[in-house]
Image: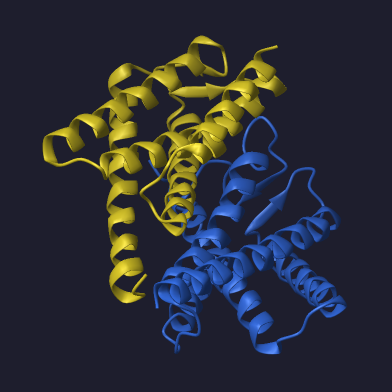
Chain colours: A yellow, B blue
């Protein structure tokens, strides 16, 4: 039940993203998506294994949900918000980026609430720090790649 | 947050040498546009990382990387060793300019090479199997190499189309 509900949600989100008129180049989307994978996998392993603040549920359905979140949901949210913020200037940009961090924190807390992740010693501030770090890292990497794409390769 | 190795021995030296090889390889004259090279490098790392962080961690835990079950500094450095594999795979594919059944043969040869290399890494304790087998690795590499080639062809075609549209 929970797995199919989440799957339906992911599919609706993915279809919406495909239909949405994007400002980012396809290569930028692929780039951001893969950078998010690299960051979230590392951060998740550090938090769950090295620090032990969260634990991944042993139930297979929860394990798969955690994987889908990292492979589909987190990259999708970050790509979408980077695309949206690219339409605005300064203050609006900061508000949009901060909203995305709040949303990512919320998704993580929904995972804890649904039992996908088990809280060992986690709190909302750690979650905010985690997503600020992830978002800033991805944003700066995207900025560098955008320069490569437009200036050096002349696309 | 990231652990240091419990013993600095063969596996750590091997990772350092592979990282140096990586740096030297990407100093050579470039054959692809920068934007595409970056995507190939990222794909090589992210496929390996996604697989490792899915089936090599709790609760699946089919194998371990390096000295301990925890995430070590050299586990992170290990991902710097994957880009040459993906890059050389598509590099020779383009140089050979073949199609049809040859592509299948090419994928099988690369998968064999990858399995032999993995066997070497198992011997020097970069990988420690807890239920995984080298026989599972062969079909995995077949899929991964196929994804590399499909992805590369797709981005290259997209790039050429974009360039020709703009000129």
| Total numbered badges shown on the rendered structure | 0
Residue depicted at 78% across the width and 62% down the height: B142
For residue A53, side relative to residue B63 (left or right): left
Q: Position of residue B64 (x, y in %)?
A: 64, 47
Image-quadrant location for residue A21: top left
Q: Is residue B149 visible?
A: yes
Q: Nearer the viewer, residue B151 or A108?
A: B151
**Viewed as shown, does residue A144 lie left or right of B167?**
left
Outermost residue, left direction?
A91
Q: Toward the viewer: A21 or A133?
A: A21
Up/down of B93 relative to B80, above or below: below
Residue displayed at 32% across by 18% down = A124
Q: Residue at x 34, y 25 (%)?
A: A127
Residue A58 in view, yes or no: no
Nearer to the camera, A25 or B60: A25
Q: Is residue B77 above or below residue A66?
A: below
Where, quadrant-wise, is the N terminus of chain B in this rendering? top left
Report the residue at 35% width, 67% height from top.
Answer: A149
Closer to us: B65 or A73: A73
State which quarter of the image contains the C terminus of chain B: bottom left
Horizontal and vertical percent position of residue A67: 60, 33
Image quarter for residue B44? bottom right
Where residue B130 sits: x, y (%)?
Answer: 75, 43
Q: Where residue A1 sits: x, y (%)?
A: 70, 11
């Amino acid at each position: 039940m929970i797995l199919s509900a989440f799957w339906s949600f992911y599919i609706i989100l993915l279809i919406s993203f495909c239909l949405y008129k994007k400002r980012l180049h396809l290569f930028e989307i692929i780039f951001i998506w893969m950078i998010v994978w690299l960051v979230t996998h590392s951060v998740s392993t550090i938090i769950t294994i090295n620090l032990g603040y969260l634990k991944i549920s042993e139930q297979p359905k929860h394990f798969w949900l955690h994987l889908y979140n990292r492979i589909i949901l987190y990259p999708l949210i970050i790509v979408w918000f980077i695309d949206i913020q690219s339409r605005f200037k300064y203050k609006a940009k900061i508000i949009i980026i901060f909203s995305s961090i709040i949303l990512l924190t919320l998704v993580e807390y929904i995972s804890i609430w649904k039992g996908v992740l088990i809280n060992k010693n986690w709190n909302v501030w750690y979650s905010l720090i985690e997503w600020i770090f992830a978002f800033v890292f991805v944003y700066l990497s995207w900025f560098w790649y955008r320069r490569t794409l437009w200036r050096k390769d002349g696309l | 947050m990231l652990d240091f190795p419990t013993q600095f021995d063969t596996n750590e030296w091997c990772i350092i040498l592979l990282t140096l090889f990586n740096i030297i390889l990407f100093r050579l004259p470039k054959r692809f546009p920068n934007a595409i090279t970056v995507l190939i490098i990222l794909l090589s790392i992210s496929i390996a990382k996604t697989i490792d962080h899915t089936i090599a961690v709790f609760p699946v835990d089919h194998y371990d990387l390096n000295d301990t079950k925890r995430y070590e500094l050299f586990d992170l450095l290990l991902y710097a060793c994957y880009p040459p594999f993906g890059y050389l795979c598509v590099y020779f594919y383009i140089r050979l300019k073949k199609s049809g059944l040859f592509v299948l043969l090419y994928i099988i040869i690369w998968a064999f090479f990858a399995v032999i290399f993995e066997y070497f890494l198992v011997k020097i304790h970069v990988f420690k199997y807890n239920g995984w087998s080298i026989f599972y690795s062969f079909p995995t590499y077949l899929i991964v190499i196929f994804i590399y080639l499909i992805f590369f062809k797709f981005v290259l075609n997209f790039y050429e189309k974009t360039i020709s549209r703009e000129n």
